[in-house]
Image (cartoon, grey):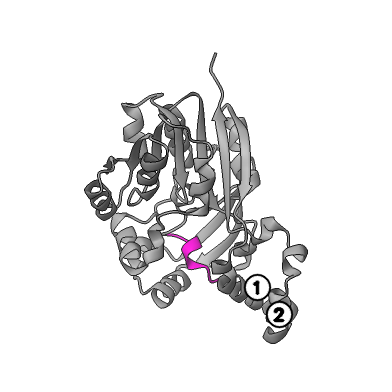
């Protein structure tokens, strides 16, 4: 039986299978990246659901992209490590001057650098992309090429706030990753996590290759993410959805046009006209339009 990466329980359900050949072809056609080496001797990738939390994940769990894969993405796409994003702005609201902060998967360290400038914080970043580590270190940021689990061994309860932005969906070993984050966090401290919202229009994008291995290993929603609070003595402090942005419109229009055409046989011209109308913001709820969800947890005191 396949175990859940969150609970290590076999209370899981197989939902679907995806041909490896189609994944490799999509990466090659859309991004110009060859990922065939990640799928040696594997013909199909399976998608399971953890029935205890609702978390959906890819199997087998040995498909995660390595440092070289992310260096390729960084080199090809300027947007991959965006210096300041919506989730950064939201997280900054929870940060006060003098806090000691750990960012997991910090990329070039732009978020920490900005916080040092506006909040006077003491920040440490962890990043496995060596190129990004070197870029951040050149800018005077304390970035370490170190896994979270190793870092946690020598830094128990050292941080007032631990954060990760668009990282958890890349992690196959969710339980050990989550426990390591909490090990680093002081009692009463905050844990901020942002992930792609897989209850949004993204879930109907059958060609959304960056939502598949070796890039993503899991598919999170508000429900599955907030259920972690019950498992780890946490309190959900705040749930935020990214507002619908102009820069996502072409992607949104493309995905929804393909989906409505395939599902309801509607002509593309009609669906594009409908989706571009201003009332789309009323007809479609924010949860469906928001590409990112962010949850702020509070670590309850053990006393």
Q: Please state the extent of the stretch shown in magenta in the rendering.
A: 206-213
Helix, strand or loop under label 2: helix
What x and y, as percent, mark residue 13?
62, 50
Which one is in front, 275 or 52? 275
Percent x, y of residue 115: 40, 42
Main SS of residues in magenta? loop
Asked where in the image residue 181 lies, by quadrant, the reply is top left
Q: Are marks 2 and 1 in contact (CB under 8 Å)?
A: yes
Crowdedness near tag 2: few (<14), some (14–19) or many (≥20) residues, C-alpha within 10 Å: some
Which residue lies under the disc numbered 1?
A: 256
Work out whether mark 2 precedes mark 1 in sequence or the reverse, and give the earlier one: 1
**Residue 233 visible in the shown view:** yes
What residue is rendered at 25% in x and 53% in y?
A: 135
The residue located at (44%, 66%) in the rendering is 43
Vertical arrangement, residue 286 with respect to residue 36, above or below: above
Give the residue at x 37% y 42%: 117
Q: Is residue 44 above or below residue 175?
A: below
266 to the left or right of 1: right
Looking at the rendered structure, the secondary structure element under dot 1 is: helix
- Tell me the residue that label 2 is attached to: 271
Distance, label 2 to label 1, CA atoms, is: 8 Å
- In magenta segment, residue 162: no
């Amino acid at each position: 039986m396949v175990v859940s990466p969150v609970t290590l329980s076999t209370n899981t359900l197989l939902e679907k299978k995806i041909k490896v050949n189609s994944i490799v072809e999509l990466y090659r056609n859309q991004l110009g990246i060859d990922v065939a080496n990640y799928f040696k001797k594997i013909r199909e990738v399976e998608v399971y659901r953890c029935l205890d939390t609702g978390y959906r994940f890819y199997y087998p769990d040995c498909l995660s992209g390595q440092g070289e894969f992310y260096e390729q993405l960084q080199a090809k796409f300027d947007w991959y490590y965006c210096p300041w994003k919506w989730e950064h702005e939201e997280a900054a609201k929870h940060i006060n001057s003098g806090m000691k902060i750990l960012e997991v998967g910090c990329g070039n360290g732009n978020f920490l650098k900005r916080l040092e400038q506006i909040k006077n914080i003491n920040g440490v970043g962890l990043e496995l992309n060596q190129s990004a580590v070197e870029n951040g270190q050149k800018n005077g940021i304390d970035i370490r090429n170190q896994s979270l689990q190793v870092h946690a061994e020598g830094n128990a309860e050292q941080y007032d706030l631990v954060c990760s932005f668009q990282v958890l969906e890349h992690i196959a070993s969710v339980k050990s990753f989550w426990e390591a984050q909490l090990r680093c966090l002081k009692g009463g401290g905050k844990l901020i996590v942002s992930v792609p919202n897989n209850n949004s229009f993204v879930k109907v994008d059958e060609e959304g290759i960056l939502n598949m291995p070796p890039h993503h290993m899991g598919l999170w929603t508000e429900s599955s993410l907030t259920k972690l609070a019950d498992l780890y003595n946490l309190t959900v402090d705040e749930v935020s959805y990214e507002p619908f942005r102009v820069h996502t419109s072409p992607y949104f229009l493309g995905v929804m046009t393909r989906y409505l055409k395939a599902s309801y046989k509607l002509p593309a011209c009609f669906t594009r006209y409908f989706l571009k109308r201003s009332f789309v913001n009323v007809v479609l709820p924010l949860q469906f339009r928001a590409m990112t969800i962010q949850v702020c947890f509070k670590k309850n005191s053990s006393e």
